[in-house]
Amino acid sequence: MCYNAIVGSVEVVLRKETQDYVYNAYQKTLEFLNRKTRYLLRPEFGEYSSMYTFTTENIDGYLRKIDVSGKDILTVTASGDHLINMALRGAKSIDNFDVNRNTYFMAELKIAALEALGYEEFLTFFTDSEKRRRDYAGIVAVQRKVDENPHFFEYKIYLKIRPFLKEEVALYWDLLYEEYEFSGLKMEEKGLFLGGDKEGAINSNSYLKNEQEYAKARSAIQQVERRYYFSDILQIHQLPATYDVIFLSNIYDYVTDDWHGVMTEEAFHDYVANGLKPILNPDAQVAAAYQYHYRVKNAAYKPSLKNLFRGRYTIDRRESLEKFGYKKVLIPSVVQEYRKENGKDCFYVYEGGKTR
Ligand SMILES: C[S@@+](CC[C@H](N)C(=O)[O-])C[C@H]1O[C@@H](n2cnc3c(N)ncnc32)[C@H](O)[C@@H]1O
């Protein structure tokens, strides 16, 4: 009796802590969405910032070039797409890191939706339009949505996903739906999402290629161990595990950016080559940077500059990580302009940590 009472009170404490955590995340997210000043040229990444609904990388492309099956993986959390695609490709365990705590709620929402919804309804819920067209607003290149989706994050569909959510994840989304009058479109208007279109989502993700792959991903995700860490990229060497493959997304672009960056390319390379050693298994590979054009660093910004200088701007073909001996792997581009020309994205793989 006494034992039960103690166990009971411990549960109550844990539940309260979890609730407080979620309320805090919700409040901080609202503060972020209501902030007065914002960057125009790039997304802001903070502890509670907007969530990507889909990857912006050709994950399908690079998982054809880098084998994850049976391996222990560390990857960025972002939209949860890295995790789902790597589960589909047979990864043994997948740890996820992100500086944005909200990404946990997005990734878990996606996994629950994979269980709750069929293929078409999943796409209906998560995609904000059929496709994108790039246009210019003054000098800035903006992506315009073509055939906007009125069912984006529709509450009626959310209610089908809800029974499959962990309690704390449901609480987070319930609070946001209540705040925004149970309207996914209002959440979107406020900037809660860095949204993705249907065409891009299908091009980038193996699990969205067709219904069969979607069904395979649904069972694969149940087989794989997954954990989430809230960490800056420059702190992941402290994680309590070791990995066969690490995917660092395109965070390199941001941390070495000429305007907002926090480090040089040399320092980034030093972190990959030396800093990450404590968490690398023998023969580990680090997919250190995704690049949206195989020749050009920060290629996603370049169309704006080209527009600004009316064609006189010549693309800066500066080498990036290849000068440090990284393997450069080319894959079909996901950027509309480059896709049209059969262009290529690339990612840089570091294998210098080999110890066998
Ligand atoms: C760089 S963004 C871009 C989208 C990405 N290419 C994809 O396909 O999902 C991906 C994620 O990186 C996270 N991020 C950005 N800077 C970071 C940093 N310094 N440390 C850890 N995570 C970071 C963001 O919060 C975001 O969720």
Image (spheres, rainbow, N blue to C red):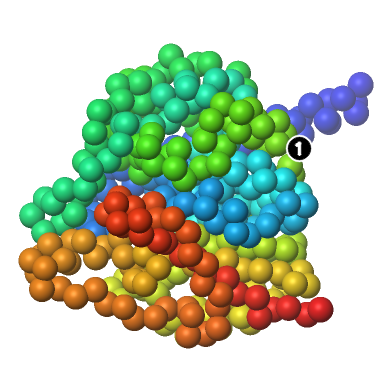
Q: Which residue is mark 1?
A: 223
Of residues 47 and 234, the one drawn nearer to the viewer in this rendering: 234
> What residue is shown at x 69% (from left), y 78% (from top)?
353
Residue 183 found in image quarter: top left
Cβ(mark 1) to ligand 1 < 8 Å? no
Observer-nearest of 129 and 315: 315
Instruction: Give the number of marks.
Output: 1
Horizontal and vertical percent position of residue 202: 45, 38
Q: Is residue 218 left or right of residue 26?
A: right
Q: Name the quarter where the C terminus is drawn.
A: bottom right
Q: Secondary structure at mark 1?
A: helix
Side of 226 relative to 38 (left or right):
right
Image quarter hosting the N terminus: top right
Give the residue at x 40% y 56%.
333
Q: Amino acid at mark 1?
A: Gln
| Residue drawn at x 83%, y 31% as measured from the top left | 6
253, 351: nearer the viewer? 351
Q: Is residue 288 visible?
A: no
